[in-house]
């Protein structure tokens, strides 16, 4: 006779639990490759001062076009700090912008450069560039030898005030944005203001929307500062931009370190206010508008939605839209009016947003200046109304 089926799991469970502590500095400086600036040398050499560290350096071609002498300055810097740093091979020039994340061969090329330089787990892959180059090189560094040491120099406002100070990397696959990537904290992030000086105005402006976003959901004082300094920011005054970048970066870093979910295992992405429609707009426009520009529209849309949903008082939407417009953003794009059947095409962004994270739909809205609130349902009719409101503003 067989015994009755057991009600417990057969076998022995050995619980295994460990945690890994991550720590990395985000440093604000200027002139990182001036030999008199010891920062990079100390950042890399500091923990093991007796060692000479091998570096593979990847640079965004857009940065090199704006600063053709960077190449020589990096080599000279490594020579001047030869006790700690050894530049291996030439700089690797990486095409800037989304192309590098879309090109299926780009990853193999990046890995090939690491192989050619015999980069090992004690060597460093240093990436200098906009968010796209950082994402692609960061991904290559994270999977090469299962992860080599990685230092980032974000060179756009968006990368310095948001994407570059975080723990994620990714490339696009089969037309799907950020489909393949890892969570891999860098060894250090160096935000150098001189890279911002080189940027075209459109790129300087684009990254400001992430600061507006994080201020709106986290820090009313910072939001008030943005309003008070909108003219200086719109004129791209470096001192104002420095403050915007640092305060925004700090708020983003705080969320990663203190938010309780640095590797996004839950269903929420609390800092992605305004992003469900922004991601959709980026793809609907074939990246004709950049991420930051799309986020500005997404912020205005979700602020209006928050008013329509009764979360925010009437007038708050106008105030936010006005700030974004004063910063120079256009809060309308024809793609917002596009329909798929009877429905606005942008609304599909909600399903895509949920699919990327998994679990329940979680969208951050506003309940006050400086205070976001998570909701789990979005009324499509109210989205239509909010889009109509933006259209009326954009057309007037
Ligand atoms: N990993 C993350 O957590 C995260 C978060 C948000 C966004 N992102 C990604 O970031 C990317 C967008 O990054 P971005 O806004 O920095 O733009 P980008 O990387 O696309 O760069 C925009 C353009 O500016 C050029 N450029 C970069 N720095 C320059 C400089 N100092 N001077 C002159 N030209 C310069 C580039 O060559 C490129 O042509 C997207 O791919 C997005 O998915 C990643
Ligand atoms: Zn963003």
Image (cartoon, helix red, strand yellow):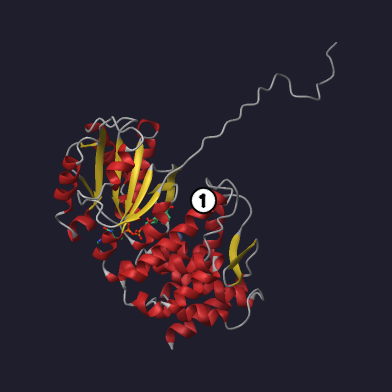
- For disc 1, the marked residue is 256
Task: Identify the residue at horizontal 31%, vertical 30% (top origin).
Answer: 120
Of 44 and 346, the residue lying toward us: 44
Find ligand 2 in the image and state its quadrant: bottom left
Could you say which quadrant of the image residue 233 lies in? bottom left
50 displayed left or right of 210:
left
Report the number of numbered marks: 1
159 displayed left or right of 250:
left
Up/down of 364 relative to 56, above or below: below
379 displayed left or right of 95:
right
Picture quarter with the N terminus:
top right
27 displayed left or right of 64:
right
Picture quarter with the C terminus:
bottom left
Rendering coords of residue 368 (x, y %): 61, 72
Crowdedness near tag 1: few (<14), some (14–19) or many (≥20) residues, C-alpha within 10 Å: some
Task: State the residue lying farthest toward the bottom.
Answer: 396
Of 349 and 319, the residue lying toward us: 319
Within 8 Å: ligand 1 and the Cβ of disc 1? no
Task: Identify the residue at horizontal 38%, vertical 41% (top origin).
Answer: 187
Of 67 and 243, the residue lying toward us: 243
Up/down of 353 relative to 119, above or below: below
Up/down of 58 relative to 363, above or below: above
Task: Answer yes or no: is residue 43 visible.
Answer: yes
SS at badge 1: helix
Task: Identify the residue at horizontal 37%, vertical 43% (top origin).
Answer: 139
Task: Answer yes or no: is residue 105 visible.
Answer: no
């Amino acid at each position: 006779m067989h015994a009755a089926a057991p009600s417990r799991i057969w076998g022995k469970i050995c619980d295994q639990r460990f945690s890994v502590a991550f720590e990395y500095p985000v440093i604000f400086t200027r002139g990182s490759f001036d030999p008199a600036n010891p920062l990079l040398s100390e950042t890399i050499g500091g923990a093991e001062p007796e060692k000479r560290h091998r570096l593979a350096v990847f640079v965004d071609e857009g940065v090199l076009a704006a600063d053709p002498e960077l190449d020589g300055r990096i080599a000279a810097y490594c020579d001047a700090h030869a006790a700690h740093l050894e530049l291996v091979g030439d700089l690797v020039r990486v095409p800037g912008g989304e192309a590098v994340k879309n090109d299926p061969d780009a990853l193999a090329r990046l890995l090939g450069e690491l192989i050619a330089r015999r980069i090992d787990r004690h060597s460093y892959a240093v990436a200098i560039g906009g968010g796209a180059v950082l994402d692609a090189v960061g991904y290559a560094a994270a999977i090469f030898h299962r992860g080599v040491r990685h230092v980032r120099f974000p060179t756009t406002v968006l990368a310095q005030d948001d994407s570059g100070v975080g723990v994620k990397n990714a490339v696009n696959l089969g037309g799907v944005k950020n489909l393949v990537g890892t969570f891999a904290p860098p060894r250090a992030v160096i935000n150098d203001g001189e890279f911002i000086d080189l940027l075209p105005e459109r790129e300087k402006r684009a990254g400001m929307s992430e600061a507006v976003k994080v201020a709106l959901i986290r820090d009313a004082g910072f939001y008030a500062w943005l309003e008070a300094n909108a003219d200086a920011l719109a004129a791209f005054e470096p001192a104002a931009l420095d403050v915007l970048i640092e305060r925004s970066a700090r708020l983003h870093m705080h969320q990663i370190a203190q938010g309780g979910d640095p590797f996004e295992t839950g269903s929420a992405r609390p800092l992605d206010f305004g992003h469900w429609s922004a991601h959709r707009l980026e793809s609907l426009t074939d990246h004709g508008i950049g991420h930051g520009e799309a986020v500005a529209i997404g912020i205005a849309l979700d602020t209006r939605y928050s008013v329509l949903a009764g979360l925010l008082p009437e007038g708050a939407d106008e105030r936010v839209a006005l700030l974004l417009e004063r910063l120079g953003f256009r809060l309308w794009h024809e793609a917002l009016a596009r329909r798929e059947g009877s429905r606005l095409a942008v609304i599909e962004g909600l399903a895509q947003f949920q699919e990327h994270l998994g679990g329940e739909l979680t969208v951050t809205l506003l309940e006050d200046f400086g205070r976001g609130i998570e909701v789990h349902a979005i009324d499509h009719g109210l989205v239509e109304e909010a889009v109509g409101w933006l259209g009326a503003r954009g057309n007037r």
